[in-house]
Structure formats: C-alpha cells, structure tokens
Image (cartoon, grey):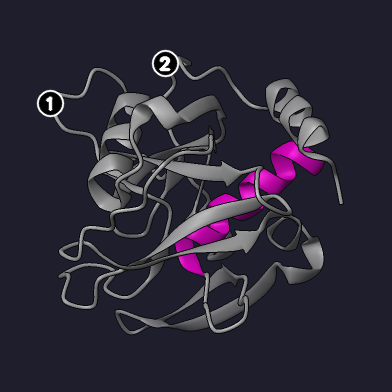
Amino acid sequence: METPEAIIGRLRDRLDPVDTPDLVPRLGDGDLNGAPSPTGRTLKQAAVIAPLLLHGGPPRLLLTERASHLNKHAGQIAFPGGRIEPEDTSPMDAALREMHEEVGITQDHVEVIGRFDPYETATGYCVTPFVGVVHPGYRLQPDPGEVADVFETPFDFLMDPANHQRESGVWQGQERHFYAMPWKNRYIWGATAGMLKSLHDRLYG
C-alpha cells in the first residue's frame, strides 16, 4: 500500500491542472460497446469530485448511494457531483458546490489536486472528474433528497486491476458492457466504475 505522501505526489504528477479548459470527453460508456467516445453528439455538462481521505486510517475514497426515489440513476453508487449550472464559474466550482449540497462537506475542507479524463455517459452527459483531498474537521450532512448513504471504500481496492470486472446487462433492449467493482455489499458500476478505471490508468497505467 502506498503512503499518503506517495499518493499525493503521484496525483500531482499525473493529473491535469484543475483549470484545463478541455470539456470534450476522451472516454465513456461506449468504449466497451463498439462506440468509442466521443460520439460527437451534443452533451450536457456535469462535474464530480472523487474525495480522497488520507487521515484516520488507510487511504479511502468517499462515495454516495443515490436516493431510491430519484428519477435518474436511483440507488446507484456515485461520486458527489452533478450538472454544471449557469451560476457556476467553472467545472471545479460546480463539483465543489454539488459536494456541499449532497454530503455537507464545505470547500474549505477540500484541496483539489487535479482532474482526469472527461467521461461521456450513455445518458448524454460529459462528466469532468476531479480528485480532492478532504482534510479533517469536516462534518457529513447528507441531503436525504439526493443521497441515501455515504460510505468509504479503500483506495488500494479501487486501484487494483484485479477488482476491475467487466460485466454486462440489458439496457433499452440492448446488451451493454460496463466496468464493475463490487466491494462488500456495494455494487460500484457503470460510469462511476468507468471513471475509477480511468483514474487507475492515469495514475498507474
């Protein structure tokens, strides 16, 4: 297992600067389904943050379980984040705002290290993902309107290629292939698992 210092050094060395203007997806749900991203279609813009905890034990990533009553992606595992709104000054600003709204962690507790590859989802979004180190002293206050649960998953588990499973299911009448990283009773799959695979490839590939 890497030390927190080694992980921070690797992140700073391998990730893109937070203000990189590129919002064009490089990877996506289509990559395992014969339709490599980008597809060229018009996409809605979103941003998420992978919150990295380097205190109180081994390095972990904080993930959410979306509320079961939501119209889209109900019950799925996700990074904190969401759609970029007109009032957001940047994708990073949107990711930090959404994290505060969803789980209660304020911007002053987060050091955003960088961003990795924008990701095109099957549902028509270009998601820009960031990695942010969450410093001690934060208070979790999940919004029950959006989040059913918040949990931590070991960073070394998510970055281990042995746990990057390829699975399939039927969506809109067609078989779709996707990454999955089941951990305990949590089924991390789809776009979230795809972005975690992308983060692994950026850091260790």
Q: Name the residue under label 2.
A: 21
Residue under the point 32% across and 75% down: 75
> Where in the figure is residue 115, as x and y percent of width and height?
53, 29
Taking the magenta stretch, the answer to whether it contains residue 195 is: yes
What type is the residue that disc 2 sits on? Answer: Pro
> Where in the figure is residue 114, as x and y percent of width and height?
56, 25
What type is the residue that disc 1 sits on? Answer: Pro
- When asked about the image quadrant of residue 100, the answer is top left
Q: Reading the chain from its start, which is encountered first: label 1 or label 2?
A: 2
Give the answer, above or below, for where 41 lies relative to 179.
above
Q: Residues within 10 Å of mark 2 (few under 14, many from 20)?
A: few
Q: Cα distance, mark 1 to mark 2?
A: 16 Å
Tell me the magenta residue range.
Answer: 189-205
Q: Name the residue under label 1.
A: 86
Residue under the point 43% across and 53% down: 79
Q: Nearer the viewer, residue 143 or 88?
A: 143
> Where in the figure is residue 7, as x and y percent of width and height?
76, 36
Taking the magenta stretch, the answer to whether it contains residue 39 is: no
